[in-house]
């Protein structure tokens, strides 16, 4: 049975209907009508590049007027392609930065699924620190990870089976001046010989026709295939969803959860370094918290300070490590809020000073907010079904005050509770 890279369906065989097994960058109508999938070529011509420069930074409201003007001198399809690429470049700035995004090429799926540049750069540095000088990047997509590896001085074989995606990856390597370090190959990843490389990186597709895929064996290719490939290499990294069950992590792998700017971006299974280890890495930094195998933290009464652990810490099940460092405990055995009597600096959690504790009661909260002249209310919750916007609408006084506050909707020793405070 042959598994292929970046299929959107959960089927493990190549399906008979290509519309159900899309890859990064493919478009349904082209596949359905057997049209050429590589429509990037016209944009790489002098005329196409000139059009891309002409439409750079075009606002959505101005697109019609710009298109009408440019179609007087250029083919309509080429103008539309340039405007579409300009929109994708604008969307990609959040991941790649304005300078790179303004030169690179993208597909709609590529923008959504590619790794954020800061995360890819961090992972490339980890590879380099391991002495890796060549990587087989399987399921490379538009080449975001390959670019980061090449910039770290690592030679890359970037593989994907979708012709349109391969064309984009190759164009990106060229436009960024990295073509000498990145070989882009159109192939089935399961048929690629990786024996000549120091490491393997696999980023399987984790989205299907119905959205995110949560079963690792429904990835394309499946996680079991990726693990088998990783075990054959001196070093390997497998990108997986942050919600991967801990029991699905192989014993001979290190599991790392990565957040960037407070948002959890991915989990990575590393082979060939730190078997059995668990870590949470926070970017920028990086700041890395290693698991120490601690038991669950004790539950204690609410102290003066409340700490909200970073999402990567929570996903990595390392709340106990942070609680020990803070000499704190949990407000409830099922809630990842840490409370302590003293303020201690930590990069792994946000600290709040708690001023009030009251049972869940919207009227009492509204009265307290009026008394404190609160006009800006941040609502955070763990273990509560209440919607923050609904609470904010009901609790904020009509005459908004000038002060700000944060309310935590949670459970304390099993009881629904409101904790009012402010960031330290």
Image: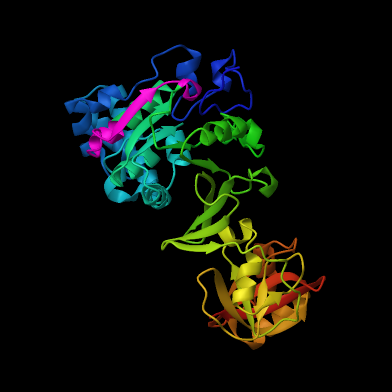
Residue 244: quadrant of the picture: top right
Foreground: 249 or 370? 249
* Quadrant of the image containing the N terminus: top right
In front here: 261 or 241? 241
Residue farthest toward the right in the current orientation of the protein: 414
Residue 140 visible (yes or no): no
Relative to 115, say whether 11 is above or below. above
**Where is residue 3 drawn, in percent x and y?**
56, 22
Image position of 216 with respect to 73: above or below = below
Give the left or right position of residue 305, taking residue 412 as reference: left
- Of residues 45 and 393, the one nearer the viewer is 45
Q: Quadrant of residue 406?
A: bottom right
Q: Is residue 190 magenta?
A: yes
Position of residue 4 relative to residue 324, above or below, is above
Residue extent of the magenta highlight: 171-191
Residue lying at 63% horizontally and 48% vertically, measured from the top left: 243
217 left or right of 385 in image: left
Number of numbered discs overlaid on the protein picture: 0
- Residue at screen point 33% across, 50% down: 97
Name the colouring of the figure. rainbow
366 part of magenta stretch: no
Residue at image location 34% in from the left, 30% down from the top: 168
Identify the image quadrant of residue 165: top left
**Residue 394 locus on image (x, y percent):** 70, 70
Question: In the image, residue 357 lies at what x, y percent?
Answer: 73, 82
Which residue is situated farthest in the bottom direction here? 371
Side of 402 where 165 appears, left or right: left
Residue at position x 57%, y 32% from top?
Answer: 228
**Residue 218 in view:** yes
The x, y position of residue 395, in whole percent, is 69, 74
């Amino acid at each position: 049975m042959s598994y292929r890279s970046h299929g959107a369906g959960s089927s493990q065989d190549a399906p008979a209907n290509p519309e159900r097994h899309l890859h990064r960058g493919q478009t349904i109508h082209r596949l359905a009508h057997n049209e050429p999938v590589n429509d990037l070529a016209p944009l790489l011509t002098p005329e196409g590049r000139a059009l891309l420069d002409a439409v750079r930074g075009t606002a959505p409201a101005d697109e019609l007027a710009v298109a009408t003007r440019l179609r007087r001198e250029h083919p309509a399809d080429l103008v539309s392609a340039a405007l579409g690429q300009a929109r994708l470049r604008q969307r990609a700035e959040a991941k790649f930065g304005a300078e790179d995004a303004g030169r690179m090429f993208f597909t709609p799926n590529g923008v959504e699924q590619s790794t954020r540049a800061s995360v890819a750069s961090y992972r490339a540095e980890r590879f380099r620190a391991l002495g890796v000088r060549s990587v087989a990047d399987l399921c490379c997509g538009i080449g975001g990870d390959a670019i980061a590896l090449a910039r770290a001085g690592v030679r890359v074989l970037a593989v994907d089976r979708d012709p349109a995606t391969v064309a984009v990856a190759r164009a990106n390597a060229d436009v960024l001046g990295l073509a000498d370090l990145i070989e882009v190959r159109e192939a089935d990843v399961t048929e690629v010989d990786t024996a000549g490389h120091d490491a393997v990186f696999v980023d399987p597709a984790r989205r299907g026709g119905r959205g995110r895929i949560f079963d690792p064996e429904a990835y394309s290719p499946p996680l079991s295939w990726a693990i088998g490939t990783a075990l054959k290499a001196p070093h390997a990294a497998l990108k997986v969803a942050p919600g991967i069950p801990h029991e699905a992590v192989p014993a001979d792998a290190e599991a790392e959860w990565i957040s960037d700017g407070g948002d959890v971006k991915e989990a990575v299974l590393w082979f060939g370094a730190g078997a059995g280890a668990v870590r949470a890495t926070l970017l920028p930094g990086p700041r890395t918290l290693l698991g120490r195998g601690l038991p669950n933290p004790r539950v204690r009464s609410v102290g003066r300070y409340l700490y909200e652990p970073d999402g990567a810490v929570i996903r990595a099940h390392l709340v106990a490590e942070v609680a020990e460092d803070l000499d704190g405990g949990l407000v409830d055995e099922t809630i990842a809020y840490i409370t302590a009597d003293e303020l201690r600096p930590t990069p792994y959690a946000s600290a709040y000073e708690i001023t009030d504790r009251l049972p869940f009661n919207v009227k009492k909260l509204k009265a307290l907010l009026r008394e404190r002249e609160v006009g800006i209310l941040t609502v955070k919750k763990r273990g509560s079904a209440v919607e923050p916007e609904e609470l904010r609408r009901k609790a904020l006084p009509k005459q908004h005050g000038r002060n700000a506050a944060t309310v935590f909707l949670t459970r304390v020793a099993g009881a629904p509770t409101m904790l009012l405070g402010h960031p330290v």
